[in-house]
Image (spheres, rainbow, N blue to C red):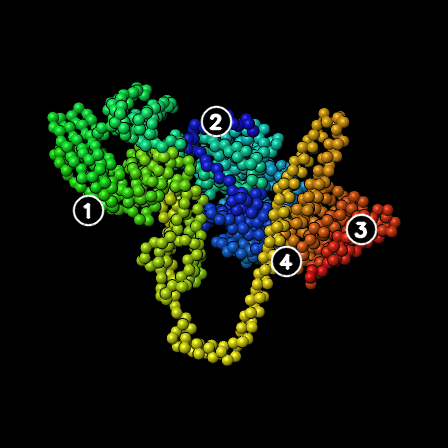
Amino acid sequence: MRGITFLFLFFTFLWANAQYKITQYTTSNGLPHDLCYGMIQDHKGYLWIGTDDGLVKYNGKDFKVFQIKDGLLSNYIIDICEISDSTFAIASWGGGMQLLQKDKILPNKTHQKSKINKIANLPKFLFAKGTGHQYHFYSKKNNTYSETIVSYYFDQTLIPTKDNIRNKTIKPQFDVIDNEVYLFNDVLFSNETLKGVYKVKDVNQVDRVFPFLKDTFINDIKKVTDTVFLAVTQNEILFFSDQKILEKKILPFQNSTIRKATVKGNRIVLVVQDNQDKSEEVIIWNREFNSFFYVDKKQLGSKQISDILIDKDENIWISVYGSGVFKLTQEKQFQITNDLQNNNVYDVVSLNTRLFFLTSSKIIGYDTKKQIKDSLLYEESLWKFDYVVKDTLFIHTKEKSKSGSVRKLWDIFVKTSNNEHLVFQDRTLSIRYGDNTIVVQKEDKSIKFISEGTIRKVVKKKDKIYSCTNKGLFVYNLNTLQLEKTYNTAIGILNDDIRDIAIDASKIYIATINGLSIVEKDRVINYNENIGLLSLNINCLLLDHHGVLWLGTQKGFSVFKKESFYSFYKNSKENSSYIQKIVEDKKQQIWLVGNNGSMKINNKIPFSPVSSPVLDIDKKENKFSVDVISFDDFEVVTEYKINKNQWEILQADILDLTKFQYGQYEVTFRTRSTNSNWNFSKKYTVENSAPWYKQWWSYTLVTLFISSLLTLIFYFRFKHIKERNELLRETIAYNENLQKELSEVRENVAQDFHDELGNKLAGITVLSGMMIEDEAFKNSIWYKQLFRINKDAQDLYFGIKDFIWSIDSKNDDLNELIYYLKDFGEELFSSTMTQFNSQIDVQELPVKLPYYWSRQLLLLFKEAMTNSFKYAEATICLFEVKYTKEQIVIIFSDNGKGFDIDNLKRKNGLINMEKRASKIHGKLEIDGSKGTKIKFIGHLL
């Protein structure tokens, strides 16, 4: 696997924008379990994730979890597919296929509780891959979802069968393309191999397709365009049509196998598995630039990849066995580079290929071409840069001492001044300004303009001078040397305290301490309320070469485009929250400086907003449930408007109009992130009508009837019932709280045992196992001791595993106990000549077992199965469970040699089983005359 590293380093320079921010989601974020499986994004935008502890619905903010308590037959959710609007098919390990409709689990009446690890929706049926060699067809005719199970065996071609021909059947992997099922080699879970690709026509027919691939092991297949397919083999990617191979891309993955591919547009996401340690890495290939991005396995928790999804916003989601889910967000335009952190940078100026940054005590120069830095340190307090004259950079200081000193940074002279600020200077014109004066020297003329207020900044644009003051904006004509125009609150701008301006061919953008004012001809447009800015106190402006306006504020920076503001990094600790200056250099890079250094943004491509959040609104009568789907990292704002009123922020997920005055209302919702446009809902109509019982005549009748009835007949009885109900309510609430606290304690104890003791025992088992396999230790005097440590650690680990399972309150469910014992029996007898069968007859689900039952029954029947495995010499064993009318009957029997209980020398095992049955007040019957039969009878109180 290390062999591919050089390839990625070689291609890195080709894809400058292909950088990804990686976000991990685990149980600490809200996932119910870190073992995650299949993922989909539905047509609304929700992300659905299967986990080892339920199904997850994720909107970008909250995880909604569906589990056994919600109607699932198993919490092990392996896959999910969307059937139609708000209807999904769920594939679970142990619960088979179940349907979810409008967030409600539908009862499973006809399907087997089988083990399914992948499911897909097709026009006429659902297709699922089950355990072993079984494949499930669920017919959608009349919405019956009747189930048919087939296997596939290979005899020169792939043939479906409903018979069990285990010596010939194989278990190919599948994918769905254009509503058709394609079968191919399963490289991950199967030791069998299948060459070529086959298409499933129906239950009884499979056809070979793409005959030119018949001698190739295909590990995955996808469609790239309408006419081009993609297939992956061990170390190459094939592009082909219906007729022939179009292109081969051989990738030098040494000692590795390409296991999976996910395609969207020009991006192909590959899962590559090391052939030795089976570790996996994710590689993102951009075909447009022929470049790669490499996600190291350590970033993904060094676990195997279960699924890859590219969502509608081009985010890449990776689910992992044991490390949760990872989101890879491609940082396109706004890939911000931080520099000079922990420095309060006052000012920045761009000069050719160099940037000069100003702090309170030094100038820092950065040559963007040579990628070098240098600096000058000053004793006096520096303030801001002035105009650059040829090879001289002027700096304004606060102190009057040492004014006029000249130093050199590279080939640039740096001159300090504490007198007037230099705005512009050439052979014929010089412009300077002080606290409240502007001095213009034009050829042999000199004129002084006296300002009414303190001057903040002076800008020269063509033949005009713009003076920003705390009394307004004053415009002077350089041709007439006269005051030409004044902009202040009298003509409609927001505030007289002007901090900065930006000018284009038709507009003047004015930054005030109360928002942004735009002057176009004689019209003033103001933006100061509910506009999306992080702060109305604007410090600086920049109009970039695309004509897009950038704003630096007291709380971050924003971009203004098409009458909308898009704001960034409000809560980032690494970036400056207080932006003091914005410039654009000759390489079309934006530089922002502030209280925590500098930030650089690539501005070659003009800013464009990201996708807007999605609104999912459920209206029930006069109540609205509003869910917002957004996988951005930016803040989302949701608002509503009633009739023609102002937009108001939606503070909760519910808008209830039932208490509004009687009448008709029109309601509209909208949502956006700080860097997206608004997404508007449709317009809803709500009518609040006065019910009959609120009419004047009904009030009179009801009042008279109720008052007389309650007064004469039910007064004392009502008082008595009220007191009794209050006592009963308190008792019920107290018992519920006790039960909830007990469940939480059991779950916490189980989790703590698993995390602490279980993990350490697993480590001892692995380490000691490695040592006893070492040839050097096999010949040493410590080999027996190490072998004993390894065996004891394994026994203790599995004993602790059963103990943890039994104390977890979720496992008090009878269904969980049944599947745990079935899995134990299937695994115990899988490598023997003994056939393990089971018969389950549980009519009522779910069945809650009393506390401590699950542990005693688990240990009792594990003892019975283990004894049969060791001593019975049986060919068939049977595990039976029956539950009727509060009675549980569990039987384990085999056709082995049996035993004579009176002549047994050691009866400890039987005695222990009887003790466990008596602890839960059950009856145990043991019969060894014809084989062995262990029967437990218990009654649920």
* Along the line of sight, the residue nearer the viewer: 772 or 241: 772
Badge 1 element: helix
- Distance Cα–Cα, label 2 vs label 4: 57 Å
Q: What's under tag 1, amino acid-wise? A: Ile
Give the residue at x 62% y 53%. Answer: 742
Give the residue at x 59% y 63%. Answer: 731
Question: Where does label 3 land, which residue?
Answer: 911
Question: Where does label 1 land, which residue?
Answer: 491
**Numbered badge on residue 187:** none
Question: Where does label 4 land, which residue?
Answer: 845
Left or right: residue 329 versus residue 794 is: left
Q: In the displayed image of the protein, which residue is found farthest to the front?
A: 401
Left or right: residue 546 versus residue 329 is: left
Instruction: Quadrant for residue 513, please give it.
Output: top left
Q: Tell me if label 2 and label 4 are in contact, CB under 8 Å.
A: no
* Along the line of sight, the residue nearer the viewer: 886 or 474: 474
